[in-house]
Image (tube, grey):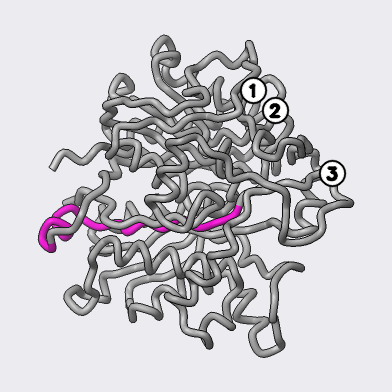
Amino acid sequence: MSKEVVISGMSIISSLGLSLEENWNNIVAGKSGVKNITHFDPSTLATRVAAEVPPEFEELSRQYIKKRAGSQMTRVTRMCVTAAKIAVADSGIDFNQVDRTRCSVIMGVVNTGNSSIEKDTTPQNTVFKTMTNSMPAWISLEYELMGPNFAVNTACASSAYAIAFGYEMVKNGQSDIVIVGGADSIINFEEIEGFNALYALSIANEPAGQASKPFSLDRDGFVIGEGAGVLVLESKEHALARNAPIYAEIAGCAITSEGYNIMAPMKDGVGMAKTIELAIINAGVQKNEIGYINAHGTSTELNDRYETMAIKQVFGDLAKQVPVSSSKSMLGHTIGAAGAIEAIITALSLKNGILPPTINYLKPDPDLDLDYVPNKSRAADIRVALSNSFGFGGHNATLVFRKYQG
């Protein structure tokens, strides 16, 4: 018998803050976390802005991670482990009171951030810092969990895939609790140089806070962000039995591959549309129930055009009635962490009845004519919402969330 899946704990570390509350308040206020890069000297690069996590993170991480273990982790891994510990505390789980063999960890990991900006790497910790399985492994070690722990790499959809796998494990009764999410940072010289060579990044450096402008006529590429997002997934019966807080339900999901191009999405958003359609079917909801879509919304020419086309293909005449917004307008593109951070924002939108805005929407593209919740957040009593994630290599994911009515 399949089980209902709920979210009982959440945490975000991003350019907009180090706590869930701080992030949510800044998102509702429509603030931008994009500023001039400080991690290294970007003066010779075409792109000189990014959404960096505040330096106060290092002090926060020392509260959650012991010195020796921290020295074996990259800064990105420390973000992930810190966010996981905050999310677990938020959920109120006492692992001494549950079956640890039925507790699992799945993280979306594109890379560990062991790049040119990483500090204090020695021969003794190089391997540990580079291991892409280190994020779920450290979390599992922290709580002595004996269910599966593993990493998923599907580019920008990685942590959305992690949520999808965690959802399936709880739904099918393989685990009672699954800690899911991801962390990432590619704010370093070599990767920004590489994305500039692909003409993928915005070069609108002034003013920094307006560089990420999804769905706008003058969008010129995505802005790199960094951070971590972690959710605690649990069967509804398990959560209720321990009087856990419940943020939202996961109603269903879909993950697909386009089999089309290593970088570009399938023409006219056909692959995206198929993913969204399948997720709605799998969730058993009706299209007219969906009150909000947290878009992938990267601020690139093709993504924003094709995602808009995909939504129109799926929803038809209803499309213009469904609010769609991009959190990346504020947070930048957090790559492997994006799916989890945006899932959390979607869950909070359902819980709090507020739709986050797409900021910097100053020059509408006449070809993109949906309701992008321009510039200001909006109160809305929504019951079902979607979160889209699409990655290089044709990795697509759509997650479906339902407001918890308990």
Earlier sequence position, callout 3 versus callout 2: 3
CA distance separating discs 3 and 1:
21 Å
Q: Is residue 45 above or below residue 281?
A: below
Q: Is residue 359 above or below residue 80?
A: above
Q: Are marks 1 and 2 in contact (CB under 8 Å)?
A: yes
Earlier sequence position, callout 3 versus callout 1: 3
**Residue at 42% across, 75% down:** 64
Residue named by callout 3:
46
Q: Bounds of the magenta span? A: 226-242
For label 3, the SS is loop
Residue named by callout 1:
216
Badge 2 crowding class, 10 Å Cα cut-off, few under 14, some 14 to 19, many 20 or more, is many
Amino acid under label 2?
A: Arg
Q: Out of 397 and 120, give the one closest to the viewer.
A: 120
Q: Is residue 174 above or below residue 71?
A: above
Badge 1 crowding class, 10 Å Cα cut-off, few under 14, some 14 to 19, many 20 or more, is many
User: Left or right: 304 with respect to 134?
Assistant: right
Residue 223 percent across, percent down from the top left: 67, 42
